[in-house]
Amino acid sequence: MGGTAHLQFNKNTIILFALPQKFKGFRNYPQKNFVKNFVSFEIMLYLQHYSPIIVAIRIMAKKKKYTIEYIIKSSPLVLYNCLISATGLQQWFADTVDNEGDTFFFTWNGETETAQMLSDEDDDYIRFRWEYQDNDEYFEFRIDKTEITNDTILFVTDFADDKEMDSQKRLWDAQIHNLIKRIGAS
């Protein structure tokens, strides 16, 4: 086969075929700039005995940042304590929450997701990043007080694909509803 490769396009996937001995990645393929122009991609290698490597690259659309605002009838300090600690988060966010320093382990229905606390400011905000998120993505809780009504406002910032935006917002609505019930702020 001489190490030649070709691309087959299928919606959001590019399939690249090459023999294992000749496959050197994208640097030897003349269309490499085409692939580099995408925001990010996943590479999955499938190996079978005596067969070519098949590399599937799934093109990932860049997620969009969004912020949702909630009025919480609670003091900022009480709200902050429910957002910053594993104990506080476990009351409303996940079935169980543990942490080792700034690494948090959130478990729902036996499945655990890991997030890193990136930064926090007392009584102001907490920012996390899921282990599977890109470096410029995060989810954040920011607390503010309105000057006129003195209400506590919780801003939730997250990232989602266009197709998932509505369902992600509904998920946050349900989570924040649990938080409001838990702290008696309804």
Image (spheres, rainbow, N blue to C red):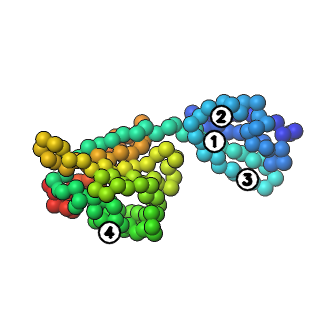
Say which amino acid is labelled 3. Answer: Leu
Q: How far, Cα to Cα, is label 1 from label 2?
A: 9 Å
Residue 57's disc number: 1
Q: Amino acid at mark 1?
A: Ile
Residue 87, label in figure: 4
Amino acid of disc 4 = Thr
Report how far apart the C-alphas of labels 1 and 3 lie in the structure. 15 Å
Local secondary structure at mark 3 = loop
Q: What amino acid does circle 2 point to?
A: Val
Q: What whole-number distance in Å separates the C-alpha atoms at marks 2 and 3?
A: 22 Å
The earlier-in-sequence mark between 4 and 2 is: 2
CA–CA distance in space, label 4 to label 2: 44 Å
Looking at marks 2 and 3 on the same chain, the residue that comes earlier in the sequence is marked by 2
Q: Can residue 73 be seen from the camera position used here?
A: yes
To which quarter of the image does residue 179 belong? bottom left
Q: Earlier in the sequence, mark 1 or mark 2?
A: 2
Do callouts 1 and 2 mark residues in contact (Cβ within 8 Å)? yes
Badge 1 vs badge 3, beta-carbon distance below 8 Å: no
Measuring 43% from the left and 58% from the top, which residue is drawn there? 117
- The residue identified by callout 2 is 35
Where in the figure is residue 129, as x and y percent of width and height? 45, 53
Mark 4: give few (<14), some (14-19) or many (20+) Cα within 10 Å: some
At x 84%, y 48%, the residue is 21
Of labels 1 and 3, the one closer to you: 1
